[in-house]
Image (cartoon, helix red, strand yellow):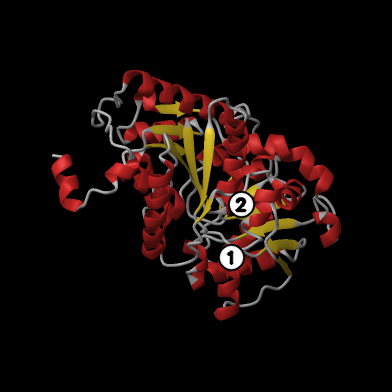
Amino acid sequence: MIVATVVGARPQFIKAAAVSRVLRATPGARQVLIHTGQHYDESMSDVFFEELEIPRPDHNLGIGSASHGAQTGRMLEAVEAVLVTEEPDWVLVYGDTNSTLAGALAAAKLHIRVAHVEAGLRSLNRRMPEEVNRVLTDHASDLLLAPTTAALENLAREGIGGSNVALVGDVMYDVALYFGDKAESESKALERLGLRPKEYALATVHRAENTDDPVRLAAILGGLSALAQRLPVVFPVHPRTRHRLTSEPLGGTSGLRLIDPVGYLDMVMLEKNAALVATDSGGVQKEAFFHRVPCATLRDETEWVELVELGWNRLVPPRDAASVGATLVAALGARGREASPYGDGRAAEKIAALLGSAARQVQDEGVEVLEPGRAEHQRNDRLPSERSRLDGGDIEAAEG
């Protein structure tokens, strides 16, 4: 079984670490790692491969930054070329980035099966590029790997269900458990920054809906500055955010400790020892919960609704600095109910087993049968390399 894994951004490196480790130990499985280059500098890419023990990519596409359409299109073309060469049994994609969508579309058009990790997440806000990516990816996928029961319910509402959907848990929880001790022993982030446990807050901001809207970004910065009057606020600055801070008059960042992005192990230590985490990152919301640190999400909605329901997370719509600051201060010391919504820490093992089981079934039967409500079709016997040589007219003729 050949699994082509498509990654491109920091959260995907973390998720892929767990599954990659299990696939490497699975007899008969071979992983082809494709890095699109969506995050390409050392602080957002290389350090994660080193710390999380991920093999170096087999293919580094070097796409880099661009508008959503241009970036996704370039990725689609480049990923397709790799898939034609490698001829995998599965294409495995993670989350909701442009790399996710490009990998899924390239595979679907070559009739290669797609498995989507973190399937079924919904913010119900189609203005978010991530929401469009995750919806389209789910509807192009053959195996939907849901992290939570809420994700299963979202898929069911869209008519996706049956044996091609599985509740596996959250692979980020796997990573948190596996690398927790390593972070404790190797990270010197607190010492390096002169921080004392539970005497600082941690903030991250990177989503386009915040960084590209001067009103929202100014409200976030003002709110964080208000929080900084109570305790230090450490702010690892994403490259997109740093560009906005240096190119637009957004007001002061009084009291904020702006630092460069940090690696996974340092981020774990900063998260678990913070008094509060303020973020617009889906992954950081969960990591705060793993360490039972209260979290304030700097958005109008979140995909991880169970954290709000449990009381560990609260939404902070960034409309004005005063309301953001007041909500952040009120969140200090908050505690939620105990629960285990993200599985048992064995999501990666379940994913590898499902991929292997489905691959054996298709190999034995020679026919791929999809669930009711989705098209049923005879498996295309052409290899990807043969299919790619058809021009547009031949493809239309071949498909009916």
Write the residue at 31% across / 36% down: 158
Q: Foreground: 7 or 243?
A: 7
Q: According to the image, label 1 marks what residue?
A: 220
Location of residue 344 in the rendering, given as x and y in whole percent from the top left corner: 62, 26
Mark 2: few/some/many CA within 10 Å (<14, 14-19, 20+): many
Q: Secondary structure at mark 2?
A: strand
Q: Position of residue 157 (x, y in %)?
A: 33, 34
Above/below status of 106 relative to 45 = above
Q: Nearer the viewer, residue 199 or 385?
A: 385
- Neighbourhood count class around disc 1 (C-alpha, 10 Å): few under 14, some 14–19, many 20 upward: many
Element marked by disc 1? helix
Q: Which residue is mark 2?
A: 296
Can residue 336 be seen in this snapshot?
A: no
Q: Amino acid at mark 2?
A: Ala
- In the image, taking residue 359 as reference, residue 322 lies left or right, namely right
What's the residue at 42%, 24% (across, down)?
358
Instruction: State the image coordinates of residue 49 (x, y, percent, origin top left).
Output: 65, 49
Measured Cα–Cα span from mark 1 to mark 2: 11 Å
Q: Which quadrant of the structure image shows residue 256?
A: bottom right
Counting residues from the start of the chain, the first of labels 1 and 2 encountered is 1
Regarding residue 2, the answer to whether it shows in the image is yes
Residue occupying the point 38% across, 27% down: 164
Q: Residue at x 42, y 62 (%)?
A: 71
Looking at the rendered structure, the number of numbered marks drawn on it comes to 2
The type of residue carrying mark 1 is: Ile
